Amino acid sequence: MNIIRIIKSCAVLSITALITVSCSDYLDVNDNPNDPAISTPRLTLPVAEHNLAILNAQDMTYLGQYLAYNWATPSNWSTNQEFYRYTINTSFYNQVFEESYGVIFRDLTYVQNYEDPNGVIDYSAYKSIASVLKGFQYQYLVDLYGDVPYTEANLRSANITPKYDDAQTVYKAVIDDLTAAANTALNLPVNAENPGTQDIINHGDMNKWAQFANSVKLRMLVRLSNTGQDTYIKDQIALINANGAGYITSDIISNPGYTDNEDKQNPFFGYFRKFSTGAETDRGDYTVASDYAITYLSNTDDLRLERLYAAPASGSTYKGATQITSLPAVGFTSKDLSKVGPGLLVSTVQDQPIMIMPEILLIQAEAISRGYIPGGDAAAKAKYEEAITASFVKLQVPDAANEAMTYYNQPIVNVSWASSPNKIEAIITQKWVALNGTSSIELWIEKTRTGFPSGLPIPSEGGGVRPVRLLYPGSEVSRNSLNVPAQTAQTAFTDNPFWK
């Protein structure tokens, strides 16, 4: 894929840069990255993992938070107007496409294709991990763009103008890849090298990688619930059951050894706070709670409110802003509004979530409710309540388990399972709360798929229609014009994903 590479300080490195990842020399480059020696999967994998974590922690989470109406901008700032006006064009968040192909897939493909020149080291574990991460990111590319390059992608100079494959074809190919990756992870050759701490996500625990592959696969299968392919979905879940690894049992996180230093702290934390001093960045000042989110959490007596958002500097009452373009100094300013909360901004060295337990538990609850996984209403309810408890625990709500129980026992629709006539709506609404600030791109995608949460506002200047996808970047259109599918300014609002 011939895409301009985006450089992010030391975060995006050459695939052949020699690095060693540890708590003391996190992403330290000792050789000239423009004139490298040689790389191996051991050196390339942690770079790919780190870049994937950055893209999902920053750009994709920020985008999801605004399109899911969780965040807004105070009136003393005029930034972020593209969110309120739904200015979706070929420049809007094009880094999602460009960095996936130009940085992340490039490195992961290198790992997949690498063979030890001496024929001594078996890199099957690395290749399995690369396949899982590719599947994770390809899912988002299809969800957000539709048709994408797949069969001819990532060939570098061998094909700089790859064809675009049908979205559903890519989805099912990725599902097959995840199936194979999980099986490989569980059945490695005896001489396969274990990545150990060079794997900054699961530290070489291949059972966890199989569980992660199964979990991403289940997410994709549930995404297909509107397509009339129930037999296919059940058959694929049977393959998950056959490998025996199950689903993740703890959060999937990345941490190469974040430190309280410039460009080396947790990427999400670094979006909002400066290293060393902890002072707010400009983004930290102009990113505030939405009025809708504050009102919803308050009305449902949800203690997660005080962890997802912080009390305003001017008082103790939590307040949010409307997503609207305002002239500076009109309405509530940043000091009057709640900002990103202490449950999300813990420290410079906090782990970076990739997939968290509340999400996979809610996915399982939906799969059970739809009859893809046996167990019936009681089993779905148990997963639902377990997910809420996991969310309270993750956000460090005091006395989390008991407070979660008090919360979900309230006779409120979409809070109590028994009080919720539409179980899918309850599940997706709770996902909207639990993934606030974490994997938040899921919230926009799920709103497109299900229509939930119901009542989620659309900015008055947004034209009354929420976008359902992104547009292919202008750089890709100019370089691969014969293959890029036709699109117009309205495509982002009318071209629903195939699974819709």
Image (cartoon, grey):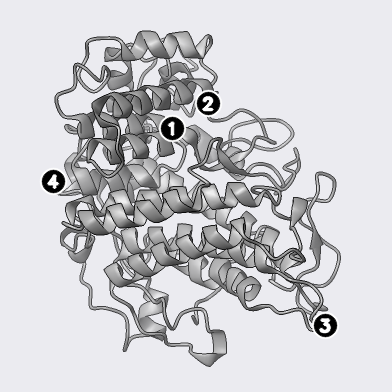
User: Which element is circle 1 on?
Assistant: helix
Residue under pointer 2 = 394
Q: Where on the picture, by quarter, is residue 112?
A: bottom right
Q: Nearer the viewer, mark 1 or mark 4?
A: 1
- Spatial CA distance of label 4 from label 2 is 35 Å
* Three-letter code, disc 3: Asn
- Spatial CA distance of label 2 from label 3 is 46 Å
Tell me, yes or no, if residue 121 can be seen here: yes
- Labels 1 and 2: the sequence-earlier one: 1
Relative image position of residue 147 (x, y in whole percent): 30, 72
User: Which element is circle 4 on?
Assistant: loop
Relative image position of residue 453 (x, y in whole percent): 23, 34
Are there few (<14), some (14-19), or many (20+) residues within 10 Å of tag 3?
few
Residue under pointer 4 = 464
Residue under pointer 3 = 118
User: For residue 358, which numbered disc appears in the image?
Assistant: 1
User: For residue 134, which numbered disc appears in the image?
Assistant: none
- Spatial CA distance of label 3 from label 4 is 61 Å
Residue at image position (67%, 48%) is 205
Residue at image position (27%, 9%) is 410
- Spatial CA distance of label 1 from label 4 is 31 Å
Relative image position of residue 7 (x, y in whole percent): 61, 65
Are there few (<14), some (14-19), or many (20+) residues within 10 Å of tag 4?
few
* Three-letter code, disc 4: Gly
Q: Nearer the viewer, mark 3 or mark 1?
A: 3
- Labels 3 and 1: the sequence-earlier one: 3
- Labels 2 and 3: the sequence-earlier one: 3
